[in-house]
Amino acid sequence: MGAHTLASLETYSSILSYITVFEVLSSSLYPKIEPSFLEKKMILPIFLIFSLLSSTSNAAVQDFCVADLKGPDTPTGYVCKKPAAVTVDDFVFSGLGAGGNTSNIIKAAVTPAFAEQFAGVNGLGISMARLDLAVDGVVPMHTHPGGSEVLIVVSGSICAGFISSSANKVYLKSLKKGDIMVFPRGLLHFQINAGKTPALAFVSFSSERPGLQILDFALFANDLPSEIVEKTTFLDDAQVKKLKGVLGGTG
């Protein structure tokens, strides 16, 4: 049984218990009040309880839910490994110690420690990653629909920023060693090596599976017809085809 399933059962049980207690108190304290009024009075407390319980971490229901990576990947996440099969190694990840391969078009590498790689973070609402930026390296405009991000610069200089969704306001900063910047969930953001030496940063997320969608790849690295890309981006045909050619897109 997965952590989310257990949380749902716990929530359902709590709601039923609350309703039962409320009904008993209501019948004794307000015997002459119309049922419809009591029903209306129950709406707000029940709503508040749902809000509180839904924001509670899975860790409040059980100690942990180490992902069973050999099991199915469900819409609510991986199922939990049986406690008897869990070892200390499930809570240790050594994959961020080595630099990633930056020999690519963006001259950057992201090494993730998400639930898929680090089973111990499953259900805990946290994860990390390593970001390596070669000289002139860039992580293009992208978004993490599943969580917010915190970045700390370990070495080098990084120009980073994000764009708000309401007024499209740009928040831009040149970061140096030791600087930390937060990127709110779902907002478009980027990182660029602003120095003359490689840059290194570590990032943490408020989700074990924050997700990733890079805007350039979403537009030009697939088979979305060029004429549609042209109309939605105001780029001409030559520009669209050039970008599709660079990123491996067709259409």
Image (cartoon, helix red, strand yellow):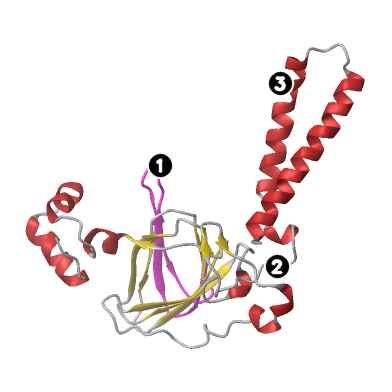
Going by the picture, which residue comes out furthest to the right?
28
What whole-number distance in Å separates the C-alpha atoms at marks 3 and 1?
35 Å
* Disc 2 to disc 3: CB gap under 8 Å: no
Return the x and y of residue 113 as percentages of the image width and height. Answer: 53, 75
Which residue is at a point 55% across and 62% down the rendered structure image?
A: 77
Image quarter for residue 220?
bottom left
Give the structural element (helix, strand or loop) at label 1: loop
In this view, 137 is above or below 52: below
Query: What residue sits right under mark 3 in the picture?
Result: 40
The magenta span reads 152-181
- Decide: is 184 above or below 177: above
Comes first in the chain, label 1 or label 2? 2
Q: Residues within 10 Å of mark 3 (few under 14, many from 20)?
A: few
Give the structural element (helix, strand or loop) at label 2. Answer: loop
Q: Is residue 173 left or right of residue 73?
A: left
Q: Is residue 148 left or right of residue 32?
A: left
Query: At label 2, which amino acid type do we have?
Result: Phe
**Residue 166, disc:** 1
